[in-house]
Image: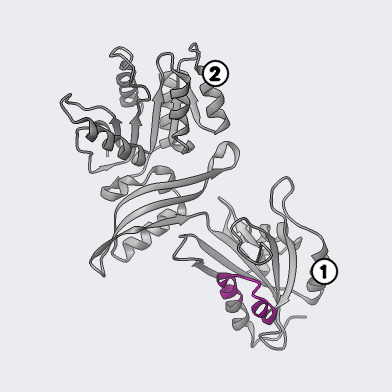
Amino acid sequence: MASEVITAHSDQELPDSWDACILVGELSANLNLSERRWQHEVIDLLRKRWTCDGRLVVLIPEPRHRDSADEKIIDWYVYAADIADVAMFWWPNEAELGLMFSSLAAWGDNERVVYGTPSHLPQSRYLLKYAGSRAISTATSLAAMVSTVLDKVGSGAHRRAGEREVPLPIWRTDSFQRWHAAQASAGNTLLGARRVWTLSVGPEKGVLLYWALRVRVYIRREGRVKTNEVVISRPDISVVALYRRGVTIDDTTIVLVREFRSPASTPDGLVHELPGGSGTSEAAIHQAVRETLEETGIALDVRRVQARGSRQLAATVSAHHAYLFTVEITSDELARLRVMQSAPHGVANETEQTWIEISTFSEIRENRLVDWATLGMIADVVLDTAAKPPIA
């Protein structure tokens, strides 16, 4: 497929598909005609520099025909801001700082926006400082702004119909792709979506950790459209059940970790869970081994680790999965873990601090130590291993 760049004004129908969608925004109502020429320069630059196979759509927040109703333009602009993969905003003249900062504050979605203004203007240093504190991309020339925008969209991703309303940062996540594929496999159709919020972390907030989409889905088996729910997700997690078999299922010993997690609504305000965590690139089994070392101090030989597959943790809330692994520990390892219960574990210079807890399966149930999802994973392990004798 050849590369293509087309524009869509506020009084025009949007194309039925695209690979990337860019909003050429407007943050000042006081620009005269000559100052608005920057939008045309940007479009020319995009036409020259978009060389990827596929269609780039440029959204222009002004009508092609001047007799269009103003209220329709407002509705169109809100919609365009929701669905754009990237939005670019440029101040070509001296800006009123109050207007500029209120406009900046309205966009908390740092991965989808680029701000720019000429470096010689008074507002430039304010813009750069504000954007830098929030990891928002900036530019001091139109050429640089276009380069930054194209870097963000890369080669894009082909989307059609309702898929167009899913911005690239969310579309590219593994968790969204798996959710979308599952819906398609069931015969359901994504009719539309609206980004509710995203949370990015890491250096320059370069890792999209959490996302939430309000979706409209046609449910084929029921012949209806569901519109009242939000899909939330995060990277998948890998967890390890370290266990020591007992005489009975209830006597099976399980190694947990406890730590403070903000969402916890437990009596002690802590989460009691299996060792584990998430990452962005490593294989799930290696991630599980690394997290176990960080949270318990036990270094596992990957050859001892048994995979038990993945399942969704909370299907009514989040689309992410947990990969469950098991390791049967020796009596010496169990004794070592008991000694280490008195010291915290975690990652230096980070906010994680974990403490080892060792309990039998019956104690975990009777004391209501874990949530239902964790209890299910533990039960899956102890029930499967009950008939086997413990290792030495």
Colour mapping used in the image: one colour
Considering only vertical position in the picture, is 43 above or below 377? above
- The spot of residue 378 in percent (x, y) is 61, 75
Q: Which residue is mark 1?
A: 336
Residue at (45, 55) in percent of width and height: 232
- The answer to whether one can see residue 51 in this image is no
Q: Which residues are magenta?
A: 361-378
- The spot of residue 270 in percent (x, y) is 67, 62
For marks 2 and 1, the one nearer the N-term is 2
**Quick one: label 2, few (<14), some, or many (20+) residues within 10 Å?**
few
Nearer to the camera, 27 or 293: 27
- The answer to whether one can see residue 62 in this image is yes
Judged left or right of residue 74, residue 119 is right
- On residue 147, the disc is none
Considering only vertical position in the picture, is 48 above or below 192? above
Q: Which residue is mark 2?
A: 125
